[in-house]
Image (tube, rainbow, N blue to C red):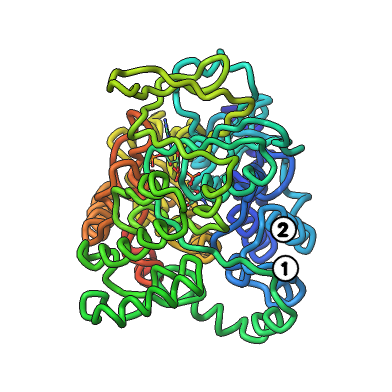
Amino acid sequence: MNSQETASNRLDALIIGAGFSGLYQLHCLRDKQGLNARVLEAGEGVGGTWYWNRYPGARCDSESHVYCYTFSKELTEDWNWSERYPGAAEIVSYLNHVADRFDLRRSIDFGSRVVSAQFSESDNGWCVEDHTGQRHYAQFLITAVGCLSSANVPDIEGLGDFAGAWYHTGQWPHEGVDFAGKRVGQIGTGSTGIQAAPVIASTAKHLSVFQRTANYSVPARNHVLTPDQRSDHKRDADAIRQLTRSNSNGHGWRISDRRALDTRDAERQAIYEKAWTTGGLKFRSAFSDLLSSKQANDTAAAFIQGKIRNLVKDPVTAASLADIDHPYAAKRPPIDTQYFETFNQDNVTLVDLRKTPLLRVSENGLVCRASNSEGHAVEQEYNLDILVFATGYDAITGTLLRLDIRGRHGVTLKQAWSSGPRNHLGLQVAQFPNLFMITGPGSPSVLTNMPAAIEQHVEWISNCIAYMKHHNYTLIESPETSVDSWVNQTNAEANKTLLPTVKHSWYLGANIPGKPRMFMPYAGGLDRYRDICNQVAIENYQGFEFS
Ligand code: N01
């Protein structure tokens, strides 16, 4: 690294990503602390996850009045959400509004994809290279890349032979896709597939949904917000903020103290019925023991499976949809708008890949292994014009690893995480000084309402940097002992729950071939995590080392 070049244009902080995290981090460092901070963003606009995820039906599962920043009363006051759950386009509009309101754009380089980041021992800082070869120098490097930004297109034989068009939901064309008159195949029935299928089916000639693992879903019960509901949210903004900052999940509700196993059958059923009618992720707040006791969880599972069987008219399809192999909410629980009802439409077919496994993509569509009336294996081809991959992401670590980040002595993040992600408080990796991760592995992130987790991380990182400036420290790093201790705590919290018991969960990296299997988020709750981080700060950032 040329030290003259470094000194002349070195930033205080370089932030990667202009979604919820990056925008707020920029505002905190540039506008509140007067630091020289910049954002590099691969997309041509702000939005992060929401910039790319424009698939049909893309909508947030958090309610709009909590899926937003809370740091500015004026911002809360002057923004009006239109629906109970914000759609992707409205979230992008919101983030554009934030970028304009706080004049953030002038400090963001759009269309700038980071290809490598190298820590320099001589400069105690980072050299970050973008796809054009331009180098950017900064004391601090902060990743704000989101948890679900590396699309997973499964390696299915023959995809190159397909004569039709194919798309991954996480890289959706901005001009949209016209399904009218088309035979569409959708692979994947996670949160995304469950949102997309009803919308695709509303215009497609035919939709075939290829389901490998059946999934729970609870009705979202989305609706347009009334003027009264909007003004209630504004009037109660302080209380809502207090709630999202003090509960375990960052949503606008607390998980009940009541245990499913201590509740009589009829009362338990009535509670589930009410939660089903209310709809949304709040369903999981019905009882406290749903994620700690399999027996308790079975009661929720049986309730939802009963609903699926009632909603879907064809008994064979209903049985496949209700044949769920994991505990409720042990995978991220989807919420839907008419998902199960969609299978009652004449133009929709469920293909159960457990009965008829997917063999390959052909020129005409997808080929599965079925059996004929004599029980002999035969190939069954589904002719398709469009193939939609709702197959998820190389979640949480995928994008971080693709950035080719190198710490002390050139050690790569891939090497440091060869057995799974390891860091201190979800924030810092040993041997990678002055690097902070927002909502990375080891933090509550995807188990919470993301903006709540993001605000907590950004504020903690900003305070830590302010502390360093105040004490004239130039370097912060986490020793291995701190990392070991946090990894043990993260594993211990996960093991108290049913979360690590799922076969194909992306929480564990188990959806990506070859990815080390390890439960990645911190499952002890955002409230506990916040307390731990605050205590560390109060004790002069105990567990971190400064120089
Ligand atoms: O991805 P997923 P997603 N052959 O990994 C299947 C967030 N989100 O995009 O379960 C056949 O959950 C796979 O099958 P299986 C939310 O946090 C948020 O749906 O592995 N099938 C599964 O059915 C969510 O959890 C919002 O057996 C294959 C599906 O593809 C996260 O994004 C909205 C396959 C992937 O499900 C990811 O959800 C939407 C193969 N080779 C999503 N490979 C909000 O509201 C994979 N599958 C904020």
Q: Position of residue 469 (x, y in %)?
A: 54, 60
Q: Secondary structure at mark 1?
A: loop
Q: Position of residue 485 (x, y in %)?
A: 24, 55
- Residue at the (35%, 45%) spot, across then down: 505
User: Is 495 displayed left or right of 62 in the figure?
Assistant: left
Q: CA distance from mark 2 to mark 1?
A: 8 Å
| Local crowd size for mark 1, using a 10 Å CA cut-off: few (<14), some (14–19), many (≥20) | some
Amino acid on which disc 2 is placed: Glu
Towards the viewer: 530 or 37: 530
Q: Quadrant of residue 84?
A: bottom right
Q: Are marks 2 and 1 in contact (CB under 8 Å)?
A: yes
> For mark 1, what is the residue?
82
User: Is 158 displayed left or right of 505 in the figure?
Assistant: right
- Residue at the (62%, 43%) spot, across then down: 201
Q: Is residue 487 above or below residue 44?
A: below
**Residue 77 visible to an observer of this rendering:** yes
| Local crowd size for mark 2, using a 10 Å CA cut-off: few (<14), some (14–19), many (≥20) | some
Amino acid on which disc 1 is placed: Ser
> For mark 2, what is the residue?
90
Q: Earlier in the sequence, mark 2 or mark 1?
A: 1
- Residue at the (70%, 57%) spot, across then down: 95
Q: Secondary structure at mark 2?
A: helix
Q: Position of residue 473 (x, y in %)?
A: 47, 56
Towards the viewer: 425 or 373: 373
Q: Quadrant of residue 541?
A: bottom left
